[in-house]
Image: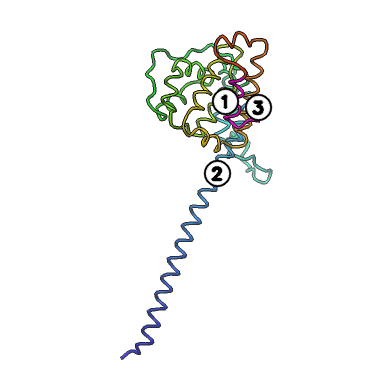
Amino acid sequence: MADPFIVAEILDTMSNTHSLQAGMASLDQMECELNNMLVQDNRYWRENDAKFRAVAQNATYEQFEDIVKASHLKPLDKTDKSPNSKSKTSIWNSITSATSRKSSGDPKPLISNEVMCSGTTPLGMVVPRNIDEFQHRWRNVEICDRIGFVQDLGQSAISKIFSTEIPPELLADFLYTFLTFGPSLTDLVVVVQTLETLAQAKRFSLSVQFLSAMERQTAGQLVEKLRAGLVDRQQDLAERGVTEWQILLIAKKFLVE
């Protein structure tokens, strides 16, 4: 007959071993989740930097998308090149190749501080009922047509869609888009009115807190451009309901000093 003390010791050892294995499994899971979070964070900042590079390069809209999609690629060192590399097209040269292929056609509007676009926004469109529907429609509208798209929707519809919140990534997209507004009074008025409407969302301040430093810098650039747009046009803009005081309030909402 087995010694009961020995049996108890064996059972205790088995229990400790099981607990240790469970603890190790938990640590492995935590490490995996942490690694995934780090990958997602790195991807966010990498793509965010790529957006700013595209804007600085006055890229076309398609080039803008390509630059962001290729942001994870890195140039090869000499030691990394294979003997057959000359016969193959480098992936990171795809943007240049796309540009050369389109050089004979009509280029897309530039993503610059002043986008001149002759395109029109769709009329008689169905008004999005929620943020998801708006985002889907927004992504399918060319950069140069987005201000017109917002104008056609109207501030009442914008207010209903974003009455509760506006996702930080969409708010940043608004900033990037509005930074391209042209010299017309209408563009400036639509941008100011829309920023005021978005700022009325219940969780707007929370969305601003989640903006990156570079996105807040974009907000600052947009505010400066709006202020510059007031020069010699204060009376005309005031008749349309836009004043310097409103722009200062917008700057305050976006924590722009």
Say if 21 sits above or below 112 in the image: below
Give the extent of the magenta segment. Answer: 245-257
Based on the picture, tell me whether residue 253 belongs to the magenta stretch. Answer: yes
As shown in the figure, which amino acid type bears the numbered disc 2? Asp
Looking at the picture, how far across and down is residue 180, in whole percent?
Answer: 59, 20
Q: Which residue is mark 1?
A: 98
Q: Secondary structure at mark 2?
A: helix
Q: Earlier in the sequence, mark 3 or mark 2?
A: 2
Q: Residue at x 60, y 18 (%)?
A: 103
Say the numbered circle drawn on residue 56: 3
Q: Is residue 180 left or right of residue 127?
A: right
As shown in the figure, which amino acid type bears the numbered disc 3? Ala
Q: Residue at x 44, y 68 (%)?
A: 21
Residue found at the far right of this picture: 78
Q: Main secondary structure of the magenta part?
A: helix
Say the numbered circle drawn on residue 41: 2
Q: Is residue 78 visible?
A: yes
As shown in the figure, which amino acid type bears the numbered disc 1? Ala
